[in-house]
Each structure stands twice: as structure tokens, then as C-alpha cells.
Image: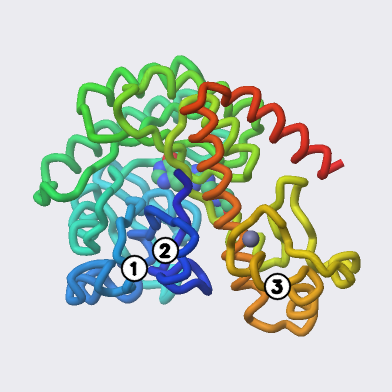
Amino acid sequence: MFMPVGTQGTVKGLSPEELMGIGSQIVLANTYHLMLRPGEALVAAHGGLPGFTAYPGPFLTDSGGFQVMSLGHMRKISEEGVIFKSHIDGSRVELTPERSIQVQEALGADVIMAFDECPPYPAEPQYIRASLERTVRWLERCLSVKTRPDQALFAIVQGGVHEDLRRQSLQATLPFATPGFALGGLAVGESKDEMFPAVGFTAQHLPEDKPRYLMGVGHPEDLVAGIALGIDMFDCVYPTRTGRFGYALTDDGRLNMNSSAPRQQLLPIDPDCDCYACRHYTRAYLAHLLRAEEMLAPRMLSLHNLRYLHRLVERARTAIAEGHFFPWAREWGGRYFKGQR
Ligand SMILES: O=c1[nH]cnc2cc3nc(NCCN4CCOCC4)[nH]c3cc12
Ligand SMILES: [Zn+2]
């Protein structure tokens, strides 16, 4: 499944009603952002993320380590955890495995992530090894302070793009037998030629009967490739972010709604799409809204792009169930990349 990203408790510009209408199943929120603002106590005062956001859920929260490294200032990593300055007000903040679990329990997501370190890319194998070994010690600390039986904690397998380090992380992580496993340390700038072998190797060593979650991925072609390699769950800001920038995802590639051609096209973004935008608007209208900097434009492109990805994984799921995934994937890719040329 594809999980829309609602970093600060909202999938930017979309209402919960719209999200449910396009078939979103799990929304991702971020521990790092919500602990800094408004603080997990306020979310807890609403009974958790569903009461705070009016999105009934389920929710998944990332554990904060990745966001500290990409957003926090003056970070210092130690065995204890990470100390950093808030990107919002510069205040000194400490995030440890224990604190991350405490925040995620207060936020009340249904799936919470172990507090891990996503090594920078590139990084020396020795650094990646030391980091994955610490991530396993942090996993242990997360599990020892977890109190809510109604929340599923997913462990995160690290190891960069190195098969031997992935193997080492798997061997150390699998015994914790968490309800699901995430593939971390990827989609951090490495090439697809490096990422996908690591995805394939790791996924095949994860349990068949538990969800496999590839963090931070991705583009339509990355979802199809990830599904081919055994991935079940994805999240990425791409569909909403590229939608805000005026790009629409279709089976013929990405359509730049800022360009001149769509302004004359009295047809929907994607005639096969059942989203509100495709049922009510022409490309010409949406292109007009974009040029006029009307806020309906980024909203509707975000809505369509999310619906596109949900439909894409629905089609993949059907193809798998009917035993013809690979022919379907080849046909989809042939058309998608023909459009891109
Ligand atoms: O190891 C990880 N641990 C915990 N969370 C993560 C989140 C992650 N997100 C990405 N990639 C997403 C990168 N985005 C792509 C689109 O633009 C924003 C950044 N890689 C990730 C790795 C991890
Ligand atoms: Zn649509």
C-alpha cells in the first residue's frame, strides 16, 4: 500500500474526507515535527492523532531519527541518542529511543517505528556497521520501554547498500520478531542501481507473513519495482509535493500542468482516473487555476497524484492475485516510459 505523508498532522491541503475518498489507508505523521510543535501533550489531549486531525486513521509515525539528521541543526549522535537544535526555534532537544517511544505512544499512532539511525549517504562501511549495531541496541531499548499493546512497533533494517551489512542487520534484527519490518537507510541519494539490489536482498530475507515497508519510496516506477521485489508498504512526499509544483502523474508519465499544451486540452488529467479532479475538471481549467495561483490547483493535483498511486498499487495487487503481475508491470512500464521520452 502507499501511505500519504502528513508530516505535521495533515496531508498538505487535503481534508480527511478527501483522503478517505481516494482510498488512503494509513497516513504517516512525524514524531520529530509534532514533538517540536505543537508538542505530543496537545495531541494526547485530543486522545491522539485521530482526535487531533479528524482523520480516523490508521496512522504510522516515523521515530524521528531520520528527520533529526535531515532537519535538525548541530546534531550530536551518541550511544544515548541524538541531541540537536530545533529547526523551529533553535531550542536544544534530546531524542533517545525511550523519548521517541514516549512521544509515539502519546501521539497514538497504530504503527510506530523503532528509533534508528539512518546513516548519511555515502558513508564508510565501518561507519554503517557501527551504526547498524547501535540501531539494534536502540531497538532493544525501544521494546523495553514500550507500554501500549495496541501499537505495533516495526523494527528497521539498516546496512546501507552493502549486502554483507544488510545481512548482519537482518541477523541481529529478525530475532525481535516485530509485527512488521522496515527497510531503512535507502532512498537517501544512492543510485537506483545501488538501492534495488539492497531492497531485493533484504526483502527476500524478511518474513513472508509480515509487512515489508520500504521507507521514503517513492516514484511510480519505484513502487512497481519495489512490489516486484516483495515490498508491501511505501511512503513518500513525492505525489503531494510534485502536485503542489504543478505536475500530474499519469500512465503516460508525468504531465507538466504548468506548460502551455494542457491549457487547450478539454480532457481530464487521466480519463481512467476516478478522482474528483478527473471527474469534474479539464486540464485546461486546472492549468488556468495554476497560472492564476489559485489554491484549488495544488490541492486537486495532490489529490489526483495520491489517487494515482493508490490505483497503481491496487492494479498491482489485482495483477498479483490473478497471477500476471510481471506481464502487467512490463506493459505499465512500457507505456509510462514511452510517455517520458
Ligand atoms: O532509515 C530510515 N529510518 C527512518 N526513517 C527513514 C525515512 C526515510 N525517508 C527516506 N527517503 C525519503 C527522501 N525523501 C524523498 C522525497 O523528498 C524528500 C525526501 N529514506 C528514509 C530512511 C529512513
Ligand atoms: Zn485523477
Where is mark 3, residue-wise?
281
Name the mark nearer the viewer: 2 or 1.
2
Residue 69 falls left or right of residue 263: left
Task: Please tell me whether mark 1 sits on a helix, a strand or a loop.
Answer: loop
Closer to us: 266 or 304: 266
Q: Tag on residue 20? A: 2
> Mark 2 touching mark 1, by CB under 8 A?
yes
Amino acid type shown at disc 1: Tyr
Q: Where is residue 23 in the image (x, y as percent from the top left)?
A: 45, 56
Q: In this view, does 101 lie above or below 52?
A: above
Check disc 1 and report the residue beneath it: 55
Q: What element carries label 2?
A: helix
**How packed is label 1: few (under 14 Cα within 10 Å), some, or many (20 or more)?**
some
Residue at (39%, 57%) from the top-left corner? 27
Which structural element holds mark 3?
loop
What is the C-alpha distance between the residues marked 3 and 1? 26 Å
